[in-house]
Image (spheres, rainbow, N blue to C red):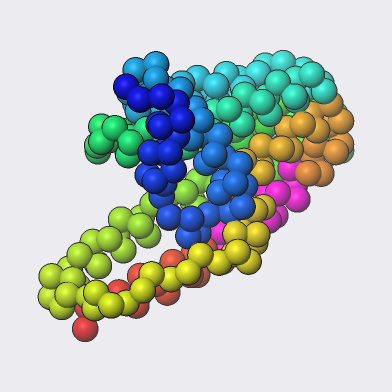
Amino acid sequence: MGSTGTVLRELRGAQKSAKGVSLYSRYVNRPAGRMLAAGAYRAGLTPNQVTLVSAAFTYAALAAVALVEPSWTLGLAVYAALAVGFAFDSADGQLARLTGRGGPDGEWLDHVVDCGKLLLVHAAVLISFYRFGELPSDAWLLLPLGFQLAAVVTFCAGLLREQLGKAAATAQASAAPADPGTPPAPVSRVRAVVLLPADYGVFCLVFLLLGAPGAFRAGYAVLAVVHTLFLAAFLTKWFRELRALRPG
């Protein structure tokens, strides 16, 4: 087992493409995940065990949102746990690529944990609103449900776009091999900035406002609107891309 420095160098060479990734994930979450992946490698953990560690941090934080009265202290603790859970979510894939121990089971487990996270984070906010929030109107209880809908549909539609796109590309490649001289599309810095509001790591920052219920509601509502607009843009883009992959 190599030194931590050696492991980190190997992890840097086992990174996924930065295409379609926001600045937060590229410069904050992935580097943090790389450090955690190196530590997990040194500790002898498997990628699936790292996924479960991610789930433990994330789900504990969400349980606290639902069960504990909002405060500045709670907000800081929840944000820290969610951020660490998100970094471990990056670490499991990096560890899998480093060790070659990834597989369909690990990818499945990772997606199951992510799906549960997206459902529970907004359910926890809804419960907190109902139990502790002095809401201006009961209509605010609909906000987490709408945000949850946008988040889950974006997640599921994105996975389907990826899998259907791979299947169509494989079928096209078998019929007519792609030109090996075609260079990959460059990573767009502008796109990385634009995607910041849709990044889960940026979303987690809103929990730092739990000590000020009005500010938290406002920040959460703004993010809900932004994510809904991103959903509309993503669905339009993905539908057009998949339609372009039709045979003939």
Q: Would residue 113 be found to the left or right of residue 26 on screen?
A: left
Q: Is residue 57 above or below residue 233?
A: above
- 75 or 128, which is in the foreground? 75
Residue at the extreme bottom of the image, as rendered: 248
What quarter of the picture does the C terminus occupy?
bottom left
Query: At which x and y percent is residue 22?
Result: 58, 54
What residue do we see at 30% from left, 74% from top?
Answer: 245
What residue do we see at 68% from left, 28% from top?
Answer: 79
What residue do we see at 65% from left, 18% from top?
Answer: 64
Q: Would residue 128 be found to the left or right of residue 163 on screen?
A: right
Query: At which x and y percent is residue 193?
Result: 65, 59
Please count the marks in the image: 0
Q: Would residue 70 be found to the left or right of residue 29 on screen?
A: right
Q: Which residues are magenta?
A: 220-232
What is the chief secondary structure element of the magenta stretch? helix
Residue 220 seen in the current view: yes
What residue do we see at 66% from left, 37% from top?
Answer: 204
Query: At which x and y percent is residue 67?
Result: 67, 16
What quarter of the picture does the N terminus occupy?
top left
Q: Would residue 178 be found to the left or right of residue 27 on screen?
A: left
The part of the image, by quadrant, that contains residue 73 is: top right
- On whether residue 201 falls in the magenta region, the answer is no
Query: At which x and y percent is residue 91?
Result: 45, 33
- 223 or 188, which is in the foreground? 188
Residue 111 seen in the current view: no
Q: Is residue 218 above or below residue 129?
A: below
